[in-house]
Amino acid sequence: MSESKLAGQFFDAAIGLLQRVRDEESAHVAAAGTAVADTVAAGGRLFAFGAGHSSLAAQDVVYRAGGFAVMNLLTVPGVVGVDVMPATLGSALERVDGLAGAVLDSSPARAGDLLVIISLSGRNALPVEMAMNARALGLKVIGVTSVAYATETKSRHLTGTYLKDHCDIVLDSKIAVGDAELTAEGIEAPFAPASTVVTSALMQAMMAAAAGELVARGIEPPLLRSGNVDGGTEWNGRVMTEYGDRIFYRH
């Protein structure tokens, strides 16, 4: 099979998944956008969390051109990226009981804030406990996960529950268990994961819905501009000053 044919098959698979989440998750995306807008309008703060490669979609909405200045990354040391040595430590930490509670207790998150938790499988202790503890603290929780894992895998949390069971709103990425879209003769393992593409699209769609909802209420969305366009740096300085008490990546 030619390399170009496999590349085309991946694009087809990713496009198919994007179309599916657009059509099947539209109501949930709208609800999530409204929840984000509600939080911003009420003076609350926004946080996003993901472990391992799920952290990529969380980082994608933090401190970026066209994004909300008030979206902050909730970090758990050792699980944010593959730069940790050894990289396998991050996977191990996702299964540690009690870590999420300790992180939330030492974070700036408080009642009235909103936390988006991204976990493809939603089965590990860290995202499950993060959602449980966040709701106990009075945060609104949006989960971005593949609901299929809840029926095809076993939870690793002592309650036997999954991330989806502890969220106010769930966005289902529709990613198949195993997160690999392609198989081919001569290649022993499935390959070409699409979860980052789809999950990032869900996150950006949610934020777009939130921007539209804020405008409908007569509120200017706290958006950042690119620092590489004229006037962008000045614009961002104004926004960051205005919303400084809700921005934690500058301290």
Image (cartoon, helix red, strand yellow):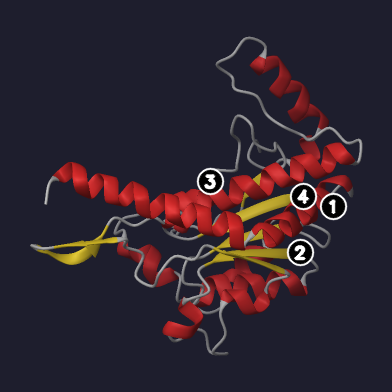
Q: Check the image and report above or below for 107 versus 217.
A: below
The mark that comes first in sequence, 4 or 3, is 4
Depth order, front residue of 105/49: 49
Pointers 2 and 1 in contact (CB under 8 A)? yes
Q: Of all residues shown, which one is farthest toward the bottom? A: 159
Above or below 75: residue 148: below
Proximity of marks 1 and 4: CB atoms separated by less than 8 Å: no
Residue at the left extreme, as displayed: 186
Residue 59 disc label = 3
What kind of residue is marked 2? Answer: Lys
Q: Which amino acid does label 1 sit on?
A: Asp
Q: What SS does tag 4 mark?
A: loop
- Disc 2 from disc 1: Cα separation: 10 Å
Local crowd size for mark 2, using a 10 Å CA cut-off: few (<14), some (14–19), many (≥20): many
Instruction: Residue type at mark 4: give it.
Output: Arg
The quadrant in which residue 181 appears is bottom left
Crowd rating for badge 4 (residues with CA inside 10 Å; few <14, some 14–19, many 20+): many
Residue position for label 2: 140
Q: Which of 87 and 182 is in front in this view?
A: 182
Residue carrying label 4: 45
- Residue that numbered label 1 is attached to: 38
Element carrying mark 3: helix
